[in-house]
Image: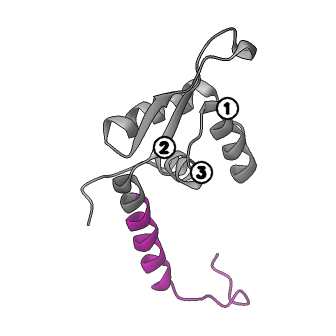
Amino acid sequence: MSEFSLGTLEETILIIVLMKNESYGVEIAKAYEQHNKQSISLPAIHIVLKRLEKKGLVTSSFGEPTPERGGKRKKYYKGTTLGYRVAKEMQDRRTEMWSLVPEINLNYGNL
């Protein structure tokens, strides 16, 4: 069992990073919007990525400067083995908890 506790946003961003070999802020924002049907700001993504990197769950590196970005380099993020294990443990715990939830008969509807 991992000693990490991640919030929902951290877990979501980590999973998005793990979905690709490498990704950068704008790609992560697009994937977030596609999968969650809501937008997220780039500063919010970067704050989460810094937290995840500090915890050792993702790493970052800079790409080459491009003319389209005025000579600026993109910062790419990549999930680590630890990041994968933490995300997988969280998913396994959630699946185990859901397996304990009884199916309800909606005809009696408490929910």
Instruction: Give the farthest residue toward the front.
Output: 64
Q: Please, what secondary structure does the residue beneath circle 3 have?
A: loop
Q: Amino acid at mark 2?
A: Lys
Q: Is residue 84 above or below residue 63?
A: below
Q: Please, what secondary structure does the residue beneath circle 2 have?
A: strand
Count up the numbered dots.
3
The answer to whether the residue labelled 2 contacts the one labelled 1, judged by CB atoms less than 8 Å apart, is: no
Residue 103 in picture, x, y percent from top left: 59, 89
Using the numbered discs, state the Cα–Cα distance from disc 3 to disc 2 in whole angstroms: 8 Å
Which of pointers 3 and 2 lies earlier in the amino acid sequence? 3
The residue positioned 67% from the left and 91% from the top of the image is: 105
Q: Is residue 60 above or below residue 31?
A: above
Q: Please, what secondary structure does the residue beneath circle 1 have?
A: helix
For residue 44, which quarter of the picture?
A: top right
Give the quarter of the figure containing the N terminus. bottom left
In the image: residue 58, left or right of residue 44 = left
Which of pointers 2 and 1 lies earlier in the amino acid sequence? 1
Label 1: how many Cα within 10 Å (few below 14, some 14–19, many 20+): few
Q: Amino acid at mark 3?
A: Lys
Query: Can you identify the residue that label 2 sits on?
Result: 78
In the image: residue 27, left or right of residue 47 = right
Give the quarter of the figure containing the C terminus. bottom right
* Nearest-to-viewer mark from 1 and 3: 3
Query: Can you identify the residue that label 1 sits on?
Result: 26
Using the numbered discs, state the Cα–Cα distance from disc 1 to disc 3 in whole angstroms: 13 Å
Q: Amino acid at mark 1?
A: Val
Q: Is residue 49 above or below residue 94?
A: above
Query: Can you identify the residue that label 3 sits on?
Result: 20
Q: Which residues are magenta?
A: 87-111
